[in-house]
Amino acid sequence: MSLAGRSLISLWDFTKAEIETLLSIAERMAEAIGLGGRERRGSFEPMDRILATLFFEPSTRTRLSFESAMLRLGGQVLGFADARASSTSKGESLADTCRIVGGCCDIIVIRHWLMGAAKVAADFSGVPVINAGDGPHEHPTQTLTDLFAIKRVKGTLSGLRVGLCGDLKYGRTVHSLAPVMARFGSEIVCIAPKALQIPEETLAEVENLSGKRPEATEDLAEALNDLDVLYMTRIQQERFADRREYERWRGIYVLTPELMARAPEDLIVLHPLPRVDEIEPAVDRDPRARYFEQAHGGVPLRMALLASLLGLQPAPGPQRRYGLDVQPQPSAVPETAEEVRSRGRQVVENAPPCRREGCVTEVWDSLPSQAYVLPDGRQVCAYCERALAEA
Ligand code: NCD
């Protein structure tokens, strides 16, 4: 099925076959732009398509790689990088802002501090929307970038042992990465203090997919021994209401050359970046440290994503729409019944409002209540995907 005209709010929006096809297109885009110092295959012809980037929260990599991707595809970019520059600072609702922006562009990339903000944009803008991070909820394009890095180095997304380390409670990238790795048949190990463990809803999803609860440990040195991928994350300073709580956890995990000396030879170390102090700069020289390469893959990956959602077609000529002749690919790992059930979410009729702290419904209470049922029977808000009963 084509991705044209669709939005990406969570990776549940895509089948595994669609994800694998995207990674193949990204590989062709990497060739086109000469990623990693290879010879460039040339540039794309200008096209009449506009990307709007609405960044209500700070960003370097994500915003610039989306802008770079659109410009490299021959399209154009408008938007803002600071919430104060938009009319929400005058009291406009996010839904209204998105309705207006939808009339100015062909596709939207949004980052916001509230969980569910990207879903609101998709519900109201009338154009495809890409979630570039909604509070501590999800960050699916970072995960696609992670998958691209893993696939390029390891050659597969299946049968791997992936350690997620750091702030798994607030770190949105791991909330997107854990379920998709489980879908591909990889194992997750959660390395975090109890207070910063991954949300129960995400654990339940992974458990449902893999048939067992992910391992949890606080000990990085021990967990490191049998990992294929170590995914480090920073403690998410901006999500702590109390600064002292942040200071308590800061520096709890630091990857050092000494730890790397004891780690498997074929380990790869990834990090969504920015790093603060969780990986010592001396580790950068270790060939197993792949995080900068991972970040650079974000441009071709986002080129592939934008081109697919915009429905760009391959066209004659050596450079025009390069890479889009990739045929849809079946996934190497077929969809399981659990996965199909999880993707076809069962909607709750007359759902009660969520209004959880940090959910868009807390700030804009006129948004229609929406909820669905998790495979374990729990009802979750469709915006923040946190359990309704606990709200
Ligand atoms: C991540 C984010 O914004 O969630 N950054 C990114 O987009 N690469 C990770 C983080 O900020 O820690």
Image (spheres, rainbow, N blue to C red):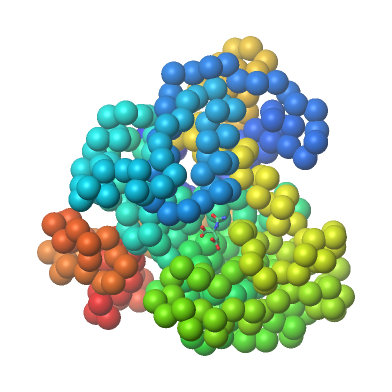
In the rendered image of this protein, does residue 185 appear above or below residue 310?
A: below
Residue pictured at 44% horizontal, 44% vertical: 81
* Percent coordinates x, y for residue 7 in the rendering: 38, 43
122 relative to 288 in the view: left or right: left
Where residue 340 sits, quadrant-wise, is: bottom left
| Towards the viewer: 318 or 242 | 242
**Which of the two residues, 47 or 228, is positioned nearer the viewer here?**
47
How many marks on residues? 0
Residue at image location 75% in from the left, 26% down from the top:
40
Judged from this view, the residue extending furthest toward the top is 317
Choose top left, top right, bottom left or bottom right for residue 303.
Answer: top right
- Residue for point 58% across, 22% down: 321
Against 79, is 120 above or below?
Answer: below
Q: Residue 32 at x, y = what percent?
A: 69, 28
Determine whether, in the image, residue 34 is placed left or right of residue 178.
Answer: right
Which part of the image, by quadrant, shows the N terminus? top left
Q: Quadrant of the C terminus?
A: bottom left
Residue 188 seen in render: no
Q: Residue 282: where, in percent of width, then height?
A: 82, 66
Residue 114: image location, x then y, percent? 34, 60
Q: Is 49 situated above or below 145?
A: above
Q: Residue at x 44, y 60 (%)?
A: 138
Q: Is any part of residue 55 visible from this angle?
A: yes
Hey, which quadrant is residue 373 in on the image? bottom left
Would residue 135 be found to the left or right of residue 356 on screen? right
Quadrant hosting ligand 1: bottom right
